[in-house]
């Protein structure tokens, strides 16, 4: 066909140009963050901005980190994120196994109910659950953030795992049952190993959700000992923020690093998880 | 003789099936019990309790007197409620379509196996993962009126940028711009859908002489319409819950007084409950949010029949 090769190349060039243009737009905010984090204060407030600090300084990191006990906050955040993710994985897997493999008269209705809770804004139950947890004496502790996660309240995760469990051939269950395995044994030694990618996907998503959560942590964590990174940064910004943006940017950058590490180690699982969350299947 | 045997095996089959199904039902209840407990304790129970609370003058942490619909009357008569609804609606109506268009656009750019495509996918997706407080604080600096990145870029094209975070008119636009940085999740969902469109459809369309625009409107959009629907519902529900960005932005601008241009619905709910400690009043606000969400979702679902196309004739 006439000129088809040329048009294919020009199409490719346009695609790359658009990708690069959009890519720059998406990267710029982070370039701004890194640049600000390494800048001495007197280079912050100039126009046009200085992109590469002269010279770059590490002082912001040292100074910012020392202004508040960020080590403590980081420890708290890791605790909340990891324990919460563990609870979510364990409980979601059990419930998803129930929905994927066993039928009762109520299973259809309950599954619809489960799915519809995905559309419920969590703010609707914010005040009554606060009342409940204050009766338990759980305010200003990590329990309100963690305990619900052990009861599969993240419907999306249950849905995702159930879809995955259903792709495992039932013949495997049957064979194991004939060999005398009970249902829990089948769950533990067939379903879980075969669904490792999906379980990791749920774990990393839940980890990130916990790490990024703000509203619940803001409500339940009151004393500075219990602050997480999110609340600590917010506290920092309200205390020193407008005057010391370079310190704030340095600390923000530091606290993003663990999340970045998780992202790059588990990127494949993020992508898979998102892709299978569509309405397919 | 043989017929008796047949009947006997049939009987035992039936019996086996019924014990089998009873065993199955028992297993079902055992495995889903954590969720049943969680649903009753953390979802359904609190919802019903909150409906009751909304009819009382309860302070935070204890129970007050029954006051009927007084809270609802007060909410609807409150100026702040109307401001919060207007701002939230503004944010949702503008940001969700823009997010969908941008996410779809990026997904079509990525939907080709060419070198370095993975790098671009990461660049577009990453911001939606690291979307915590640090990112919001970063954006508050990006929107700085005098030394921020946005106004610097605008100055390059000769535009004198506004005072984003303290000018009432620009507060929501600022949050909308920030939200566009986080479309990575929706983009990946679109990308998966695009990759599922059978390539034969495009090939035969090309043979028939269909142009790019025709292919987009006649093939791609109908084929991914279930995904558009999915992203639309999730996007709107997410937009109604916007809170962190205006809360942090507002906090950094305390010296400028409360910026009403940024006052969103969940902020109104938060203030009622955790600033003024009015759990009853806050519950009324929460139930109105629930009603909004329900009505909007139902409307979208109703209209979906006319524009969402399921290639297999219906959902699984």
Image (tube, coloured by chain):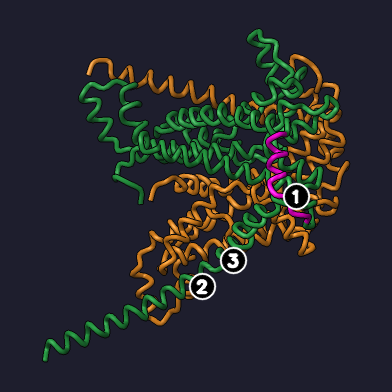
Snapshot quadrant of residue B9: bottom left
Residue B55 as seen in the image, left or right of residue A225 = left
Q: For this rendering, which residue is in front, B295 or A96?
A: B295
Q: Secondary structure at mark 3?
A: helix
Residue A236: image x %, image y %?
A: 83, 39
Q: Quadrant of the N terminus of chain B?
A: bottom left
Task: Spot the green chain and give its letter.
Answer: B
Q: Which residues are magenta?
A: B64-77
Mark 1 → mark 3, Cα distance in angstroms: 24 Å
| Mark 3 surroundings: few (<14), some (14-19) or many (≥20) residues within 10 A | some
Kindly identify which numbered label has been placed on residue B58. Answer: none
Quickly name the residue at label 1: B279
Residue at 46 percent of width and 37 percent of height: B300
Chain hosting mark 2: B
The correct choice, above or below, for A96 with respect to B88 in the image is below
Mark 3 → mark 2, Cα distance in angstroms: 11 Å
Quickly name the residue at label 2: B30
Q: Nearer the viewer, mark 2 or mark 1?
A: 1
Mark 2 → mark 1, Cα distance in angstroms: 35 Å
The correct choice, above or below, for B122 with respect to B143 in the image is below
Q: Colour of chain A?
A: orange
Labels 3 and 2 positioned on one and the same chain: yes
Q: Secondary structure at mark 1?
A: helix
Chain hosting mark 1: B
Q: Earlier in the sequence, mark 2 or mark 1?
A: 2
Chain hosting mark 3: B
| Mark 1 surroundings: few (<14), some (14-19) or many (≥20) residues within 10 A | many
Labels 2 and 1 positioned on one and the same chain: yes
Q: Nearer the viewer, mark 1 or mark 3?
A: 1
Quickly name the residue at label 3: B37
Q: Secondary structure at mark 2?
A: helix
Residue A73: image x %, image y %?
A: 79, 50
């Amino acid at each position: 066909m006439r000129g088809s090769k040329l048009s294919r190349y020009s199409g490719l060039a346009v695609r790359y140009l658009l990708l690069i243009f959009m890519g720059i737009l998406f990267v710029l905010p982070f370039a701004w963050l890194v640049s600000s984090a390494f800048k001495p204060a007197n280079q912050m407030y100039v126009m046009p901005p200085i992109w590469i600090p002269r010279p770059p300084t590490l002082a912001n990191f040292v100074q910012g980190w020392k202004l508040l006990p960020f080590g403590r906050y980081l420890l708290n955040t890791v605790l909340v994120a990891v324990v919460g993710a563990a609870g979510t994985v364990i409980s979601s897997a059990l419930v998803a196994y129930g929905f994927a493999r066993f039928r009762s008269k109520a299973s259809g209705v309950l599954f619809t109910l489960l799915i519809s809770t995905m559309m419920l804004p969590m703010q609707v139950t914010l005040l009554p659950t606060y009342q409940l947890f204050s009766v338990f004496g759980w305010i200003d502790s990590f329990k309100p953030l963690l305990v619900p996660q052990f009861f599969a309240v993240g419907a999306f995760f249950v849905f995702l795992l159930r879809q995955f469990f259903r792709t495992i051939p039932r013949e495997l269950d049957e064979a194991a049952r004939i060999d005398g395995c009970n249902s829990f044994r089948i769950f533990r030694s067939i379903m879980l190993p075969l669904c490792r990618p999906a379980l990791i996907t749920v774990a990393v998503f839940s980890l990130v959700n916990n790490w990024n959560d703000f509203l619940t942590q803001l409500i339940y964590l009151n004393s500075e000992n219990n602050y997480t990174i999110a609340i600590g940064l917010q506290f920092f910004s309200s205390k020193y923020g407008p005057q010391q943006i370079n310190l704030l940017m340095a600390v923000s950058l530091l606290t993003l690093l663990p999340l970045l590490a998780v992202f790059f180690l588990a990127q494949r699982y993020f992508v898979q998880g998102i892709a299978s969350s569509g309405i397919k299947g | 003789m043989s017929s008796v045997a047949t009947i006997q095996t049939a009987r035992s089959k039936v019996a086996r099936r019924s014990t089998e199904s009873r065993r199955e039902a028992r297993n079902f209840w055992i495995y889903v019990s954590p969720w049943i407990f969680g649903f009753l304790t953390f979802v359904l129970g609190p919802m019903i309790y909150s409906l009751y609370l909304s009819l009382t003058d309860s302070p935070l942490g204890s129970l007050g007197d029954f006051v009927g619909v007084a809270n609802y009357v007060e909410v609807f008569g409150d100026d702040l409620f109307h401001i919060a609804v207007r701002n939230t609606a503004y944010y949702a109506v503008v940001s969700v379509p823009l997010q969908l268009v941008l996410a779809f656009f990026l997904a079509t750019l990525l939907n080709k196996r060419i070198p370095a495509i993975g790098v671009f996918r990461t660049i577009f997706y990453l911001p939606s993962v690291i979307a915590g407080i640090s990112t919001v604080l970063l954006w508050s600096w990006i929107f700085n009126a005098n030394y921020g990145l946005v106004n610097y870029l605008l100055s390059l094209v000769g535009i004198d940028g506004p005072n984003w975070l303290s000018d009432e008119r620009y507060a929501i636009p600022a949050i909308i711009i920030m939200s566009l940085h986080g479309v990575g999740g929706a983009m990946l969902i679109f990308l998966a859908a695009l990759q599922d469109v059978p390539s034969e459809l495009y090939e035969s369309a090309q043979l028939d002489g269909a142009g790019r625009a025709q292919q987009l409107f006649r093939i791609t959009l109908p084929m991914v319409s279930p995904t558009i629907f999915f992203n639309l519902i999730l996007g709107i529900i997410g937009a109604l819950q916007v809170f962190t960005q205006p809360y942090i932005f507002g906090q950094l601008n305390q010296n400028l007084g409360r910026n009403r241009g940024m006052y969103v619905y969940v902020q109104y709910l938060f203030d009622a409950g955790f600033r003024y400690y009015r759990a009853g009043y806050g519950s009324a606000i929460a139930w109105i949010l629930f009603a909004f969400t329900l009505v909007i979702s139902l409307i979208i679902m109703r209209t979906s029949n006319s524009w969402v196309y399921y290639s297999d004739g219906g959902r699984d």
